[in-house]
Amino acid sequence: MGANQSIPKITSQDRAILDLKLQRDKVKQYQKQIQFILNREHEIAKEHLAAGRKDRALIALRRRKYQEGLLAKTDGQLENLEQLVSTIEFSLVEVSVLHGLKQGNDVLKAIHAEMNLESVEKLLEETAEAREYQREVGDMLANNLSLDEEDAVQTELAQLQQEAVRSPPHLHICLS
Amino acid sequence: MHRLGGVGLAAFDRQQQSQRSFAALSTQLSRAQVDTLHAQLDTFRTALTSFATHHRADIRGDPHFRHLFQQMCAAIGVDPLAGPRRGGWWEEALGLGDWQSELGVQIVDVCVSTRERNGGLIEMRELVRLVGRLRGVEGGAVTEDDVVRSIRALKPLGAGYEVVDCGDGRKMVRSVVKELDADQMVVLAIAAKQDGRVDEDLLVRERGWTVDRARAVLENMLLRDGTCWLDDQDGPDGMGRAYWVPAAMEWPDE
Amino acid sequence: MPSLSTYTTPSGFLLPSIHSAAPFFTQQPFETAQSSATDLWTRLILTYARHRRLFVLRVEDTEKTGGDWDEVLRNERINRRMKAGHLEFVLGSMVTKGLAAYEPPDQTRSVLLYWRLPEEWAEVLHEWATNTGQLNTILTFYEITDPPIASELSGLPLPLLRNAIAILAKSGRAQTISIADGDGVRFFARTGR
């Protein structure tokens, strides 16, 4: 058919570019989801604090700090991917593409394991199972945050406590 | 849904009309000449009817075609949308003149346009209002009397146009062949007082009818004649049945 | 007894006066009245969808409150709502007239609304690609439906996007590229002439 004469053939370079963009899209989507959960955890920390459960507020904040770290890592990865996409010299890029993709995937896996709304909500539950989960998470986090990050978390907690005194939170979290 | 005032009737060419005004002619003609004219018009009428029958689909479907055809008909006082005519309307057509037949066609247009929602039954006030809107400012005022007279002229055409008296001064115009029985007239009268809404209980209370009788009339109007709409979420429990007569409701312009 | 009147909803939509008539919310048994009402519902649904940029209408939207369609499917002022069976019927009519499509196919309770026809979406899509300087560039579907700057295509459901791309492909103005992880598209300027 005549109409196809001027349409270029699809090359393996085209496919590689598409692949990069698809990975970039995935990172963007995860970022959006993480941001949503970060906001949620901030509210949960406030709620715990208001009910006098300081230790659990701390867990929520630590969790949040950990995920913020993941987010920062993916930001860097995203920058790399976008740079790769925009500066195409294919012979050089071929190797970097594979390397970048592998790194990106590792980070994504970590995020995915960490992140679903259910486990976030679990922090609010009272069941024995939930308590056990919370203890595990607490331990894991304690081992994964740097000293600086731990400091930042303590500061944040103090800040929240001050805010709570001034204006108690109205958020009511419903458990299903 | 048929839209009013759009592709329906266009204004008639008044110059051409006056040229063919038979009312004007008849005062100048002698008896013999009137007879000849009758005969000629008779032939014309036959040909026109035959034309209408063969081109019915075109007339209904093509606004331009319909406009030309209606101009022809208005000149000799024929309702182009009705079926084969009964005898005796020639005298009426000659006597009434073009203005009356033009009004007749407009009345038919309004009734046909609103038939889908009211089942062929429209309140007189609403009909006068819509015809007035169709005619526009240049058309000149149209009174209820004008409409009543026009409808009388349409009667011999056999399309069922008739003025129906509901009692307490309210009139309806029926434009389908289906006759209204006495019970339906009662329902119309009551609906007219209730902004269009009727139910079985209302009829039982106001007229002392049995539930069966009330139900039968309402169901016939709903399912057989299409002269009312159903509301099945009526009442405090939201599960009652009420019947709404569009002919008795006020439909704002949109 | 309230007479019929139009009403402006909180979202700024002007409801027609028929929406304030109680029987409008009942499926009519008499055929001409039913087709008349169905035409009105169809027009109302498409106009509202265009106003709010809603793409999907489900029969279940009649059963719950707090959704996107409350302003149209309910009228609290006269205490009436559209019933599931009735909406299913109206949706069926819209699908038959090519004004909506069952999505997913092989069911009759959820549709994509064509307040723009697929052909129109195709043109909007091509125009966007042209105006944003993205012709001859490989784009993911996500880039089109979730662009960093909101566009006419933001939130466009994938089936509609695929449809639009297929239409453009027929005139040589789009090319689909598929790999294991997903699909992409490349747009071209009008060929020939």
Image (cartoon, coloured by chain):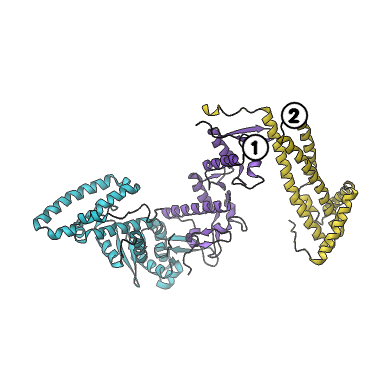
Chain colours: A yellow, B cyan, C purple
Residue shown at the point (18%, 59%) measured from the top left:
B23
Write down the quadrant of residue B207 in the picture.
Answer: bottom left
Residue A83 image-quadrant placement:
top right
Query: Residue drawn 48% across and 70% down?
Result: C1
Instruction: State the mark number for residue C139.
Output: 1
In the rendered image of this protein, does residue B36 appear above or below residue B187?
above
Q: Which residue, given by chain and number where applicable, does mark 2 sit on?
A: A94
Instruction: Residue B215 in the image: state x and y as whole percent.
Output: 43, 63
Q: Say left or right for C90 vs A36.
A: left
The answer to whether residue B56 of the structure is visible from this angle is yes
Residue type of the residue flagged with mark 1: Leu
Subunit under mark 2: A
Q: Examine the rendered structure and indicate whether residue B37 appears above or below residue B241.
A: above
Percent x, y of residue B22: 18, 57
Q: Secondary structure at mark 2?
A: helix
In this rendering, would A50 be left or right of A9? right
- Position of residue B246 measured from the top left corner of the image (x, y, whole percent): 41, 62
Label 1 residue SS: strand
Q: Quadrant of the C terminus of chain B?
A: bottom left
Asked if residue B77 shows in the view, the reply is: no
